Amino acid sequence: MYRLEGLKTRAQYWYWRMFLKSTDFSVNGRLVIRHPQRVHLGKRVGFNEGVYLNARDHIYIGDNTILSAFVRINTGGLDLRYPVAERRHRSAPVRIGNNCWIATGVIINPGVTIGDD
């Protein structure tokens, strides 16, 4: 199940379909995914305008989940427990359950788990 709007969105759908190994999602606007091989989608996932997924680690998105406009999911970043000169990158997976709606502008950082409903 997918909804397409315009030629650009149709091209995006086919492009992401190759990398995400799924056909059961919709893309309504621009979608940016870094390391798409680490993104795992459930059934009927919806992406709206300006969604950005930075998959340094795995991202799991459950069934019937919608990511509203300008949602950001980051699975990696700097470890702030160390002094500036010694900081290093760390990563942790992000899990989003089934039947979730992630509202406009939400930022989800490494290691976050969001349950069902």
Image: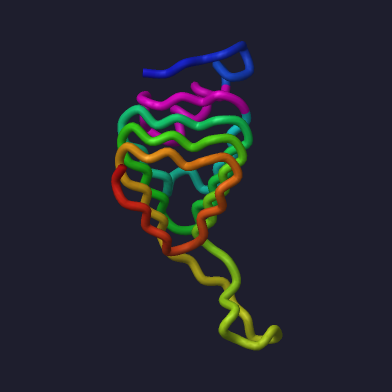
Which residue is nearer to you in this view: 106 or 78?
Answer: 106
Span colored in magenta: 12-29
Q: Position of residue 84 (x, y in %)?
A: 69, 84
Q: Within the image, what quadrant is residue 101 found in?
A: top left
Residue 7 highlighted magenta (yes or no) = no
116 or 6, nearer to the observer: 116
17 on left or right of 64: right
Residue at image x 61%, y 40%?
A: 70
Quick one: 110 or 97, which is closer to the camera? 97
Q: Is residue 53 above or below residue 6?
A: below
Residue plotted at (60% across, 44% down) = 105
Position of the N terminus by quadrant: top left
Left or right: 31, with 61 as reference point = right
Q: How many marks?
A: 0
The residue positioned farthest toward the top in the image shown: 6
In this rendering, would 110 be left or right of 84? left
The C terminus lies in quadrant: top left
Image location of residue 51, percent across then percent down: 58, 39
Give how far across and how far down residue 64 sits, in percent: 33, 32
Which residue sits at x=55%, y=30%? 48
Q: Is residue 62 above or below residue 48?
A: below
* Residue lying at 61% horizontally and 12% vertically, measured from the top left: 7
Q: How is the image coloured?
A: rainbow
Residue 16 magenta-drawn?
A: yes
Horizontal and vertical percent position of residue 81: 56, 84
